[in-house]
Image: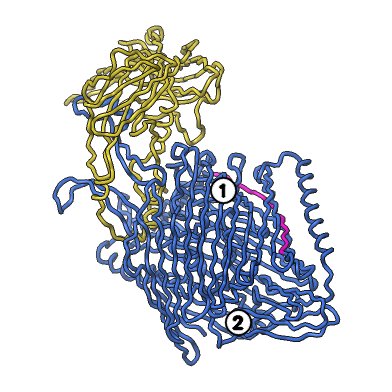
Chain colours: A yellow, B blue
Amino acid sequence: MKLRLNIIAIIACLPIMVSCEKDITEKFEDSQQNVFILSGELSAFEHPTINLTRSITMAQLDTLQYLNNAQVEIRSGDQSYQMEPGGYGNYTSSELLLQPGQEYHIHCSGEELPDASASVVIPVLPVVSEITLTVGDSLDLHLDIAIDDPATFRDYYTFYISGWLMEIHVHHDETGIETRDTLNVFTNYHLNIQDSVFEYSGNLQRFQIIEEESRYLSMVHFSDRLFNGSTHHLTVNSFLWSFYNDSIPEINIHLVKHDEHYFNFLESMTRYDPYNDLPIIQPVQIYSNIEGGFGLLTSRSHFTRTIDMSEWYYDPALLELFAK
Amino acid sequence: MSYLLENANSVSSRTTCFNCFWALLLLGISVSSNAQYTIHGTVYDQSSGEHLVAATVFDTLSKAGTVTNEYGFFSLKTKRSNVELNCSYIGFSTFHQSLQLNSDTTLNIRMNPNLEIDEVTISAQSSEREFQASQMSAHSISRMQIHKMPLLFGETDLIKALQYLPGVSSGLEGTSGIYVRGGGTDQNLILLDGVPVYNVNHLFGIFSVFNGDAINNATLYKGGFPARYSGRLSSVLDIQLKEGNMKEFHGTASIGLIGAKLMLEGPIIKDRTSFLISARRTYADVLSYPVQYLVNKRNYQSTDSYFGYYFYDMNAKINHKFSEKSRLYLSTYAGKDEFYMKDTYLNHSMENQEPEEIKFKEGFNWGNWTTALRWNHIWSSRLFSNITLSYSTYKFKDFDETQASLMRTEQYYSGIRDFAGRMDFSFSPSNKHNIRFGAKGTRYMFEPGVRIVDYHWEGVGHGQEKTGADTITANQLTAYVEDDFQLGSKIRSNVGISSTMFNVNGQTYFSIEPRISARYLISHKLVVKASYAKMSQHLHLLTNATIGLPTDIWVPTTSTIAPEESWQTALGVKYKTNTGLNFSIEGFYKEMKNLVEYAEGEEIYLNDQYWESRIISGKGTAYGLEFFIEKTSGKITGSIAYTLSKNMRQFDNVNNGEPFPYKYDRRHDLSIVVNYKIKKNISMGAVWVFGSGINVTTLDHSYYNPLMILDHDPETDYPLGDNHVIRNFSERNGYKLPAYHRLDIGFNFDKQKKRVKRTWSVGAYNVYARKNAFYIYGDQGYYSDSDQLEKRVYQVTLLPFIPYVKYSIRF
């Protein structure tokens, strides 16, 4: 049906077939100015780091241009700090350690571009009061994470579990003899969340799992809309072998609290279709909180807990399963 | 003023208020009524037997007058026993009769067409009626006026003719959408013989579904809506089909570049029963078959592939006169567009088996079907009624079928159906009052999107999978009352109220919509008019496209989608000269709320249960000034319409919540229409339009995904992953395309033959080939003229110059 949707669009554009077009590149060369693209994720208890690139106008080639000669200032209350360039468009301030609950304002100038700025508030740390991990007789794994959510504003969370996964690779030599070796891969484990924490449910599956290529493999994004001001038990079911690695027997539980900008950006990205250039379809605008430019300045605070899995990874039943 | 009905008591109190309003109104009328005799009847065209709408009936002695309603009925009271009655109508000789009354009298007037009078010359009379009426912001257009306009692809089009009126914006180049005073196309109530039509587009809006040959007249209301109309926010287009000639057989036929039309009308039983049937079909698919056959034969030995597109529509009407007091009408419209591809080939992939013949067909179609049964009855000299039962449906279907050992059909469909019953009464207690009241009940069935897969595998079995949204049923009950009354010699007003109950999924919404319009005659040449109207709309059209696509889906108000509401006020003056020139200026202000649309990026097809979560709502404001100059007599006639307006929208989820201009917010909109009778048998029509460019959301910058760039690969300096470039579009509708203008010219050459009158129509759309911008896009690639990688920006023009020729006969 998707194919015919395109057919409909093409037929709708039938008159285009008797159309003509005119090169108006010159008009855009004169009228459009590049702007700053500010990218940054400010994390609690870390030094601020942002990245600056230049936007590409309608008439310019799609090339990435890092900006290393801009003046970047970060300010909190009366205090302000210059952020120093570190190559590849990165700027950082080693003097400043970001604090939860504080507001920070970043201002960029220079590079013959219009000034750009953005403000964020670092979220307070997410509170996980209890983590319970149990493994059943069938090697089924059950994780219960108790999140104490403050009854303040809307809070936005990202949850994921990372660790080393043992991949088994099977080889056959020229004579057909099979050999096996293993490879340790650091990954985010795929999640199977059991409870209703998501903004949307049903077939839409927005925010349930957003796979951002190469950055994260599997993360769950949700707000506290359904449990604001209470303790919520996030439950994850899986099987032990899904997390198995006997040489590094641990997994990391992550709960990240983000600001709203991050979620607005993700929400617009889930609807964005970079290949949609049909003139009759309303395009998706990507969220940006940068004044005078584009990009995203967001903030987060991060809770991490490492769980030792030795007790279960050396379970005879699991080892027997892998031996097969 | 729509709100959720909370309890029975609140309904009761509102109903009581409503009843009080009626009672007071009727009481006031009965007190003011002191006439002695009533003359009533119906005004007919003597030549065809069809009734005449809005004919003027006037007693020159008492100076009392009235106009016929949409069924030709009039009722006139007089205090005198002797009257000198005149009846006039466009294109007809004035009827005159002296009467000596001693009781109430029935007078059916049969008027003779005046062939000596130029058809446009007489349209001054039409302007006079509009001048005198309390109604403002309304324009009537006749079949003759539509036929004078230059054509696109040789097809007459009512909707395109309306685009030349003030306050009416056209949509994209060449399309038939109308955007009235800042409203969207879904906010137009389009009635064909009183039945709503849900999709008026053939070929994605290039043509409208209305066949110009079958139309008698149409009236567009842009504001000051009479209470008898409700259900849409921005306009009412009331189209009346011809009734069919009661006396003689007549017809028209035409053939143009893309299609042919035929219209026949005549008596079934002379002076008792008449019929009208009209049909048209495009034939591009038929003409292309031989070419496709040759291509198939030459290139693809094993396949037999065809594709095609066509549309057809058909109007039929039967009109039976039981008596002078009672008539029955049965009318129907059916239309369909279809695009299809079919393929027959031999499948050789099955090993050790004979090749299997596979037949495959896929495509999509859409269409409307409406039908209405109406009964007019004159109960007394004061009371006229019209009872209507109607059915209207619109359906879009996308299908594919495979016929082989595995038979498989898949279809997706969406649509809307409604069954309605309506009673309208017209009551004239005196010459100073004309009261209309009535009620309408409608049952809607919405199908927001269903997918069905059927399969049958020889020797294996068969099955069916059905997914999608459930059918939603809703019931609507509307009641109204309006009184068009005269206060003294200068003031005439129409005051009315309409109330609606809409029930869906167990919830009931209630709305009360007051309407008022009034005119004050400063002199017999100058009139001031004002109006206020509140409207609500429980049907919403979902689209994320910028033109009317057949995939657009009608959905009802639900617990999460509030009814759309608007209020509009307008003030205007009209001035007329003795030389047939009319000037008018109107200012309007309109606010709309709970407007709906798809969230950005949502699929056009709805096929799940969660469609409500894909919808966003917002509000809109439109205001402007409309100038209209009309010349209705002489060899050269025409009009100049200019609109200065602003039209904004605000949605919390769009444009960061900031207000943005509506796509068709044209600050300046100018149309000049000229009709010139060169000779008795040669006429010319020309239209020049100029408008500010429409607003589009266009690509303005690109940049690298901010999240990915933080994880860039230091070896390549580039962000990790694919699709890392974000195409950033301007603010919603933030780019204004260049101003739009074009000139269309058409000529009609008539010749009276022995039995028929034939007409050659020739002309062109966009005569000077103005390259109006449809959209712009950027393209990066190697260009042969420069032999290097470049990015260029192009502006696309749709219809640079489209000539036409058409041959038609009338008999």
Asked if residue B179 is positioned above or below residue A284 in the image, the reply reads below
- Comparing B700 with B470, the one in front is B700
Image coords of residue B303 (percent x, y):
31, 60
Labels 1 and 2: the sequence-earlier one: 2
Q: Position of residue B766 (x, y in %)?
A: 36, 67
Residue B145 higher or lower than B666, as above or below: below
Which amino acid type is shown beneath numbered disc 2?
Gly
Q: Residue at x 70, y 72 (%)?
A: B328
Viewer-proximal residue among B334 and A279: A279
Q: Is residue B477 magenta?
A: yes
Residue A120 visible in rendering: yes
Which residue is under mark 1? Answer: B591
Indicate the chain on which mark 1 is placed: B
Q: Which one is in front, B362 or A324?
A: B362
Q: What segment is highlighted magenta in the picture?
A: B469-484
**How far apart are the alpha carbons under marks 1 and 2?**
47 Å
Q: Residue furthest bottom?
A: B754
Give neighbour class at mark 1: few <14, some 14-19, many 20+ (Cα, 10 Å).
Answer: many
Q: Residue furthest left?
A: B787
Q: Could you confirm whether marks 1 and 2 are on the same chain?
A: yes
Q: Picture coordinates of residue B84 (x, y %)?
A: 74, 83
Residue marked by disc 2: B266
Evaluate whether residue B425 shows in this view: no
Secondary structure at numbered mark 2? strand
Secondary structure character of the magenta stretch overall: strand
Q: Is residue B639 left or right of residue B786?
A: right
Classify 10 Å Cα crowding around label 2: few (below 14), some (14-19), many (20 and above): many
Q: Nearer the viewer, mark 1 or mark 2?
A: 1
